Image (cartoon, grey):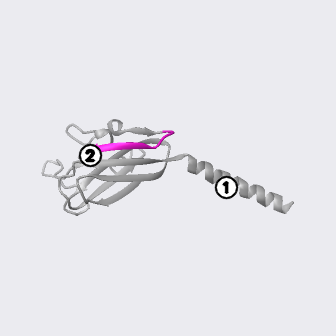
């Protein structure tokens, strides 16, 4: 009887793990128009309007090795997301801007959203990850 209970518990745990893995997808980000081959790309995947352009759900840093770059976020649960990134060409870990707050370094967002007189809006950069993995093409 004890072995039956242990087997049922093990089966239940394996079922939960398998179904949780089946519910995750990948988000592939193709970044193009990188003007200088130096520095790094700092990329944030956001799952909330409240944290957008602030603390990412998942963050990645990729060394710039060419004029294009592909980044993959794996095991991402279904939901609403936005991506924000910038090319940290001088490798100082921040998006440099001028006196008026206008960025001096290239940046981009999912859906190629651009802000007018400020950063892009969450709803403009928003996309939904459903039943299929998704690709976002961002032009700097």
Q: Is residue 15 left or right of residue 138?
A: right
Name the outermost residue toward the right: 1
Q: Is residue 121 at least partly visible in the picture?
A: no
| Badge 2 or badge 1: first in the primary sequence | 1
Nearer the observer, 40 or 116: 40
Q: Relative to 64, does residue 122 appear above or below in the rendering?
A: above
Residue depicted at 24% across the width and 48% down the height = 107
Quadrant of the image occupied by residue 38: bottom left
CB contact under 8 Å: marks 2 and 1: no
Q: Where residue 44 sits in the image (x, y, percent)?
A: 35, 52
- The reply to whether residue 133 is visible in this rendering is yes
Residue 113: image quadrant is top left
Image quadrant assignment for residue 139: top left
Q: Secondary structure at mark 1?
A: helix
Which residue lies at the image location 29% right of the left edge and 50% below the top edge?
85
In which quadrant will I find the N terminus?
Answer: bottom right
- Whole-angstrom CA distance, mark 2 to mark 1, is 40 Å
Queried whether the magenta region covers residue 117, the answer comes back as no
- The 10 Å Cα crowd at callout 1, few under 14, some 14 to 19, many 20 or more, is few
Residue 21: x percent and y percent? 57, 51
Residue 37 at x, y = what percent? 20, 59
Q: Residue at x 74, y 57 (%)?
A: 9
Q: Which mark is residue 14?
A: 1
From the image, tell me which residue sits under label 2: 108
Q: Is residue 135 magenta?
A: yes
In screen coordinates, is 133 left or right of 11?
left
Between disc 2 and disc 1, the foreground one is 1
Residue visible at 19% across and 39% down in the picture: 117
Which region is colored magenta? 130-138
Disc 2 residue crowd, few under 14, some 14–19, many 20+, Cα 10 Å:
many
Task: Estimate the x, y position of residue 27 in percent, counting from the top left.
Answer: 42, 47
Q: Is residue 24 left or right of residue 118?
A: right
């Amino acid at each position: 009887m004890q072995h039956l209970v242990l087997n049922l518990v093990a089966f239940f745990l394996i079922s939960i793990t398998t179904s949780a893995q089946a519910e995750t997808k990948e988000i592939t980000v193709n970044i193009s128009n990188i003007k200088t081959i130096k520095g790094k790309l700092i990329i944030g995947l956001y799952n909330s309007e409240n944290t957008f352009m602030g603390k990412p759900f998942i963050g990645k840093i990729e060394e710039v090795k060419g004029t294009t770059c592909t980044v993959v976020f794996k095991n991402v649960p279904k939901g609403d997301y936005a991506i924000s990134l910038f090319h940290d060409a001088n490798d100082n870990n921040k998006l440099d801007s001028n006196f008026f707050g206008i960025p001096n370094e290239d940046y981009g967002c999912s859906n190629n959203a651009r802000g007018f007189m400020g950063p892009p809006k969450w709803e403009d950069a928003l996309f939904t990850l459903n039943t299929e993995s998704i690709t976002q093409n961002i032009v700097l």
